[in-house]
Amino acid sequence: MSTLPQPRSVLTRRPVVAWALYDWANSAFATTVMAGFFPVFFKQYWNAGVPATESTFRLGVTSGLASLVIALLAPVLGAIADRGGARVRLLMAFTLLGSAATLGLALVPQDAWLGAAALFLVASLGFWGSIVFSDSLLLHVAEPGEYDLVSGYGYALGYLGGGLLFAVNVAMTLRPHWFGLADATEAVRWSFVSVSAWWLLFALPCAFYVRERDGGRMRVPVVTAVREGFRELGGTLREIRRYRPLLWFLAAYILYIDGVNTIIKMAVDYGLSLGFDQSHLVAALLLTQFVAFPAALAFGWLGGRIGARRGIFLALAVYLGATCYAYFLQDARDFYVLAVIVGLVQGGIQSLSRSYYGRLVPEGKSSEFFGFYNMMGKASAIIGPTLVGVVAATTGDPRLSILSIVVLFLAGGALLVVAARSERAAAT
C-alpha cells in the first residue's frame, strides 16, 4: 500500500486551507509591491530625474537594509514563539504592521524617496516577519509525509492569489479610466491600498482556523517569553551546530536563495535599465505568477516522487541557465521568455526548500529553527540586491550586475552536495 499522502483529502482539511490562504494573502505584497510597482515607482516617481544606476543602487541598498533588520530579528522571534506558543498571534501582529506600512506608501509624494524607502523597509519587516511564523506553522497543519504537498499547495495559492490581484492592479494602471481614476500614478497609489486590504482580509482564516499543536495558548507570560526567548537564542546557536546536515543545508540555502530573492526584487529594475517599456516588464511579471501556480503544485508532487533535494538541484540548474540568459537579453520578447523560465521553478525551489528543511528540524523546535531558516534567507537577501546595486554603480553596466548572481547559484549548489553527503553519513 502506498504511503504517499492523498492530495484531495489533505488539501481540503480546514487548517491546511486556512494556512495556505496566508500565502494567498501576503503574496499580494510580494507581487504588486515588492516585485512589481515599487521598483518602477521608486525609479520613475520617487527618484525622478536620477540616473538609472544611482536609483538601482538606492533600491538595492533599501532592499538589503530591510533584509538585514529581519535577519537580525528572525531567530529571536522564532525562539519567543516556541517559548510562548504565540505563533498565530505574532503572525497577525506582523501582518498588521506590513499592511499599515503598505497603505502608507500610497501617501508618499513625488521625489520623497527616503520616505518611500522607510515605509518599504517597515512593510518588508511585516512581510518577512510574518513568514517566520507561517513557515513554522506548516509543521502544525501537516504530517511529515505531507510536507512537500502542503508546502507546494501554499506557494501555488500564493502565486494564484498574488497574480489575480496583480492582474487587476495592472489593468488599473493600463486603463485607469475604467476604474474612475485620473491616471496611472493614481492607479499605482490605489494598488498599494488594495494590497493592504487584501493582505489583512485573507490572513483572517489563518487566525481563526489554524491552531498550534500545543493548543496555541501562552505557556508563559509574554514578558517572560521575550526574556526566555533571548536566552534560548544563545542555546540555539550552540545546539544547531549539532545537526550537521541541517547546518550544511542552511549554508547552501543562504547562497542559492539569495539569487532567487535578488531576481524577484531586481528583475523589473534590470529591464528598465536596459530600456524596456515598463508595460512589457509588468506583463512579464504577471506571466511569471500564472506559470508559477501550476509549477509550484507540480514541484510539490515531484518532491514526493524524487525527493525534495533532487527537486532543488533541478531548480538550481534552471536558475543558473536563466541568469546566463538574462545577460544576453535584447528586447521585451526575451524578457517574456525569461519570465516563463523563472516561473517554472520559482515556487518549486521555495516550497521544496521549506519542506526539506522541515524534515531536518528537531521536534519541538519548529519556530526556533525556522527562525534561523528565515534569518538565513533574509541575510542572503542582504548580499544579492546590494551586490547588484554596487556592480551597477561601479561598472555602469546593468548586464554585469545581473550576471554576478551566477556565483550564488554555483556556490549554493556545491554546498547542497556537501549537505547531502552529510545527511547520508548521519543516516549510517
Image (cartoon, rainbow, N blue to C red):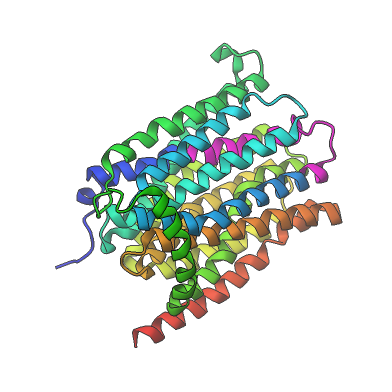
| Camera-nearest residue between 126 and 35 | 126
Question: Residue drawn at (74%, 40%), measured in percent from left and top?
Answer: 272
Quarter placement of the N terminus? bottom left
Q: Position of residue 98 (x, y in %)?
A: 52, 37
| Camera-nearest residue between 284 and 398 | 398
Asked whether residue 351 appears in the rendered view, the answer is no
Quarter placement of the C terminus? bottom left
Question: Residue drawn at (66%, 64%), measured in percent from left and top?
Answer: 406
* 22 to 238, vertically: above or below: above
Magenta segment's dominant SS is: helix
Q: Does the segment drawn in magenta span residue 372? A: no
Q: Position of residue 56 (x, y in %)?
A: 76, 45
| Camera-nearest residue between 80 and 275 | 80
Q: Does the segment drawn in magenta span residue 47? A: yes
Image-quadrant location for residue 181 = top right
Q: Position of residue 394 (x, y in %)?
A: 85, 56
Segment tinted magenta in the rendering: 27-55
* 6 to 177, vertically: above or below: below
Question: Residue drawn at (74%, 29%), measured in percent from left and top?
Answer: 45
* 268 to 225, vertically: above or below: above
Q: Position of residue 109 (x, y in %)?
A: 72, 24
| Camera-nearest residue between 86 and 346 | 86
